[in-house]
Amino acid sequence: MKTVAFFDAKPYDVASFKKFADEDINVRFFENKLNSDTVSIAACCDGVCAFVNDTIDKGVIDALSNYGVGVIAMRCAGYNNVDLKSAQGRVKVLRVPAYSPYAIAEHTMGMILTLNRKLHKAYIRTRDHNFSLEGLTGFDLNGKTVGIIGTGKIGRCFADVCKGFNMNVLGYDPYENDEFCGEYVTLGELLIKSDIISLHCPLTKDNKHIICGETLSKMKNGVYIINTSRGQLVDTSALIDGIKSGKVGAAGLDVYEEEASLFFEDKSEEVIRDDKLSTLISMPNVIVTSHQAFLTREALDGIAKTTMENFKAYFNGEELKNEVVAN
Ligand code: NAI
C-alpha cells in the first residue's frame, strides 16, 4: 500500500477523490498548504498531491527528496508554482493537463456577462426593492471583438462560446492551432482591436505582466480585461491605474497576483491587509472570484480521476503521460 499526502484539502476535494479511491493507494487529506513549514507532514509518504497555491520551491523539493517522496501530483493544469529544475532527476512532477476546459470558458463568459449587464448590481438592487434601471446599461456582445491570448484547450473553448454570441474572435498564440475558430493576429493587433481581452495562456518566465502599463496604453478606451489564467500575467497596479483613468472599462479577475495567502480561505472575519485587492474589490466595475473558474462537478471528477491514474502509473512503473519537466 502506498501513502499519499494530499495538501490544501477542501471538502469538495475529499468528496471527488473518494469517488475515485484506489485500494492500493492510501490518500491522507491535510488542510495545510504545502510549503517549507508543512512539508514534514509528507515525511512517511510515497507521494504528495498539491494545488495551485502551494509553494513547491527548492527547499520543499529538497525535503521531499530527502524523505524519499518520489512524486508530486499536481491536481491542476498549471505548474508555475513548482521548481521543476530542482525536481529534475529527483522527484517526478505530474499534472492534469485537461479536465473541463468548458468550466473555465463558461466562467469567463459569466464574468463578462455579469460585468457588462451589471448583474452583480441588479441582484443587490432588487433585493432592496430598488427597481430602477439607472446605471445598468450594457452593450450587445453581438458584433464586438474579443481578443484571446492563448488559444490552447481553454482559449479555444472560450472562442467557441464567443462565436455563439456572434462576436469577432481574434487570437494570439506563439503556437497556432487549426481548431481555433477565430482569426490569428499579432499581439499588437489584438491589443488595438479588441473590446474585450481574455487571458488563457500559462504563466511562464517570459509573459509575467503581459498586461502592463505599456500594453494597456495600446488598447481601446473602455476595454474589458478578463483573467482566469494566472494572477502574475497582470500588473495589478497598472490595471488599477487603467480602471481609475477609464482606460479599462471593467475587469473580471478569477486570479490575482498575491492570491496565495488569501484565495480558497474564509477571511470574512479579518481585515484584508492587501490594499490593491481591497481597491479592486471596492470598484463597481470589477469582479473578483477566488480562483473558482474550474469548480464544476465535471471538472472536479476529471481532476480526481486523472490524478489517481497519475499516481497509479507512477507507483506501477508505467509510462508517465502527464509528466512535466524543466525546459
Ligand atoms: P493549454 O496548454 O492547452 O494552452 C495554453 C496555450 O497558451 C498554448 O496554446 C500556448 O501555446 C499558449 N501560450 C503560451 N505562452 C503564451 C504567450 N506568452 N502568449 C500567448 N499564448 C501563449 O492550457 P489550458 O488548459 O488552455 O490552460 C490555460 C491556463 O489556464 C493554464 O495554464 C492555467 O494557468 C489556467 N487555468 C486556470 C484555471 C482556473 O480555475 N482559473 C483552471 C485551469 C487552468
Image (spheres, grey):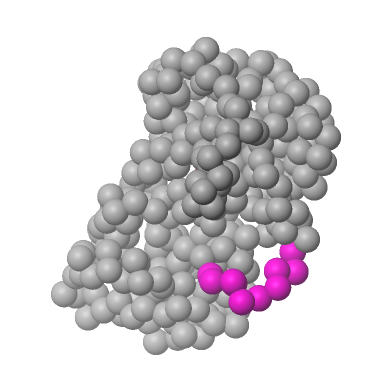
Q: Is residue 121 or residue 203 the one in the foreground?
A: 121
Q: Is residue 216 above or below residue 317?
A: above
Residue extending farthest left? 23
Q: Is residue 314 or residue 208 the one in the foreground?
A: 208
**Is residue 188 part of the magenta span, yes or no?**
no
- The x, y position of residue 301, in whole percent, is 27, 56
Q: Is residue 179 above or below residue 244?
A: above
Residue at horizontal 41%, vertical 50%?
294
Name the chief secondary structure element in magenta: loop
Residue at horizontal 61%, vertical 77%?
269
Residue 299 makes an appearance in the image: yes
Q: Which quadrant, please, contains the N terminus?
A: bottom left
- The x, y position of residue 160, in whole percent, is 39, 24
**Is residue 269 part of the magenta span, yes or no?**
yes
Q: Quadrant of residue 275?
A: bottom right
User: Left or right: where does residue 304 sit relative to residue 226?
Assistant: left
Residue at horizontal 68%, vertical 59%?
258
